[in-house]
Amino acid sequence: MSSPTPTPTAGSTLTSSGILPTVQSYGPYIYWGLGLVASLGIGYVLYKMNYQIAGVLTFLGCVLALFYYYVKWFQLPSKTEGSWPPYTTACPDFLTLADAGSTGGVAKCIDYVGVSANGRLQKADPKQTYKPSNPSDAKYYFPINKTDKNTDLCQSAAEYGLTWSTICPE
């Protein structure tokens, strides 16, 4: 006969049972306890070696360092992670803004890397000069109408085989 496997009961995890939060609340006490014992030990060894001033100064320096890191680690609020990327880019991923569209309201980005998945946007040679107004150079530019909504821009980027991580969800 095999013995039945135990089934977990409600509240059996460390977090839900309150064990982990209780252990975490002892963190500052453990920190101060170990820190003071180490500081006293180092200061005592120096004091007994006839370095009384060095022993006292080392002990005081260690206590100041303990206080600094106590405030830094246990008292200050933790920094919350912001959204990534921290700003919205003007062009799809890996494209370079070539014309801000100051006159026609349509900005143009150029691809110097060759990231278009479907080849609709051609890779431009950085050594050559392209003019956004030249119709034969249109295959090197991704147009961005400044009045388009993010969903329209995402759809347009997808049509060109591009990704735009700052405005388009996966």
Image: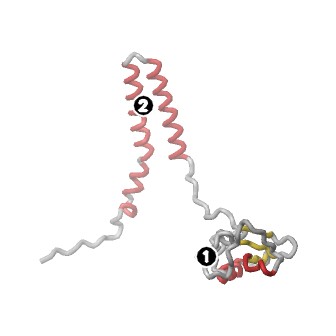
Q: Amino acid at mark 1?
A: Pro
Helix, strand or loop status at disc 2: helix
Picture quadrant of residue 3? bottom left
Q: Is residue 31 left or right of residue 110?
A: left
Where is residue 55 shown, x and y percent of the image? 44, 22
Where is mark 2, residue-wise?
Answer: 39
Q: Is residue 80 left or right of residue 52?
A: right
Alpha carbon of mark 2 to alpha carbon of mark 1: how far?
Answer: 52 Å
Give the mark toward the camera: 2 or 1.
1
Picture quadrant of residue 131? bottom right
Picture quadrant of residue 158? bottom right
Residue displayed at 40% across by 16% down: 50
Where is residue 65 shown, x and y percent of the image? 51, 35
Rendered position, 47 above or below 133: above
Query: Closer to the N terminus: mark 2 or mark 1?
Result: 2
Where is residue 79 shown, x and y percent of the image? 58, 54
The 10 Å Cα crowd at callout 1, few under 14, some 14 to 19, many 20 or more, is few
Helix, strand or loop status at disc 1: loop
Residue displayed at 42% across by 34% down: 36
Q: Amino acid at mark 2?
A: Ser
Where is mark 1, residue-wise?
Answer: 169
The image's colouring method is secondary structure
The 10 Å Cα crowd at callout 2, few under 14, some 14 to 19, many 20 or more, is many
Residue at the farthest left position: 1
Counting every numbered tag in the picture gives: 2
Quadrant housing the C terminus:
bottom right
